Amino acid sequence: MITYAGRTVPRMGFGAMRLLGPGLTEPTDRANAHLVLQRAVGLGIRIIDTAWYYGHDVSNRLIAEALQPYPADLVLATKLGAQLTTGNRPEAAVRPEQLRAGNDRDRRVLGLDTVPLTHLRWPGGETVDGVGFDEAFDVLVDMRAEGRVEHVGLSNVTIDQLRRSHARHPIASVSNVYSYNNRRDQEVLDFCTANGIPFLPYGPLDFGGPVSVEPVLQEAQRRGATPAQVMISWLLDRSPVVVPIPGTGSVEHLLENVAAADMAP
């Protein structure tokens, strides 16, 4: 278990983007997407990663349709800082008015007055579209003071940006790329571990990194498990603050992912 956005919840989350169709489009089977979400919550998952730009509100609509009224301990963890073009290509959206508009969409579509947790998803560098990282972070801090969001997190940030932000305002969650074979943000994870900040690795089942996955395949065979289960188990054992958020559009794969939390290291 872990304390996340003021709730005590299991260390297993769900990434809602994988419910969408190719190119972040509507899923071909909405009923199945609803079922996956409902089974996830039924299995004890209480952290769901989503964003309004996951398909122009598609992800948020699916969550609202499937899960309202929400369990009191459910944390819907959203992201701001990006938008989709008409061709469903992501681009930066970090200007103050864009961040606020994204929060308005989150709250309206999810049916919430206050979003439990919102990450500032930074595109990279220190200045984007004339907006500095610190300025964008201040917007989220202001929205928390206004009651728009309950807790503030960061996503896709450097160790320097994390340190700077945490010194100014409590960071409730960090979501960066991290997996068995992509550990480039190890220093970010180490900081989160030392400071008790929950870390949501996205791309947790990425097989395309620089580290050989042969040991994963061997371990899966030894345990009678899937490679994905071994990777999730490895993440959970990596640090007590890690909360994997594997996504899937399949109930079968959802059951496999959740079962990985009970696998011995």
Image: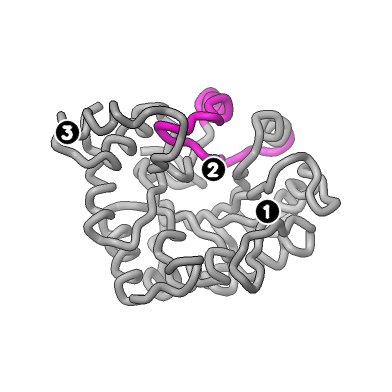
Mark 1 touches mark 3? (CB < 8 Å): no
Residue 213 x, y percent position in the rendering: 34, 31
Which residue appears at 50% of the width and 72% of the height? 58
Q: Amino acid at mark 3?
A: Gln
**Residue named by callout 3:** 221
Which residue appears at 55% of the width and 71% of the height? 57
* 187 lies left or right of 129: left
Which residue appears at 16% of the width and 33% of the height? 221
Residue 218 x, y percent position in the rendering: 22, 29
Q: Which region is colored magenta?
A: 168-196
Circle 1 residues within 10 Å: few <14, some 14–19, many ≥20:
some
Q: Is residue 203 magenta?
A: no
**Residue named by callout 1:** 144
Q: Is residue 65 above or below residue 181?
A: below
Q: Nearer the viewer, mark 1 or mark 3?
A: 3
Colouring method of the image: one colour
Residue 225 x, y percent position in the rendering: 18, 39
Mark 2 touches mark 1? (CB < 8 Å): no
In 3D space, how far apart are the residues under numbered discs 2 and 1 (Cα atoms)?
Answer: 19 Å
Q: Amino acid at mark 1?
A: Arg
Q: Furthest residue to the right?
A: 130
**Which quadrant is home to the C terminus?**
top left
**Residue named by callout 2:** 175
| Label 3 SS | helix
Circle 3 residues within 10 Å: few <14, some 14–19, many ≥20:
few
In 3D space, how far apart are the residues under numbered discs 1 and 3 (Cα atoms)?
Answer: 47 Å
- Residue closest to the eye, 215 or 31: 215
**Which quadrant is home to the N terminus?**
top left
Whichever of labels 2 and 1 marks the residue nearer the N terminus, that label is 1
Mark 3 touches mark 2? (CB < 8 Å): no
Whichever of labels 1 and 3 marks the residue nearer the N terminus, that label is 1
Quarter of the image where one finds residue 207: top left
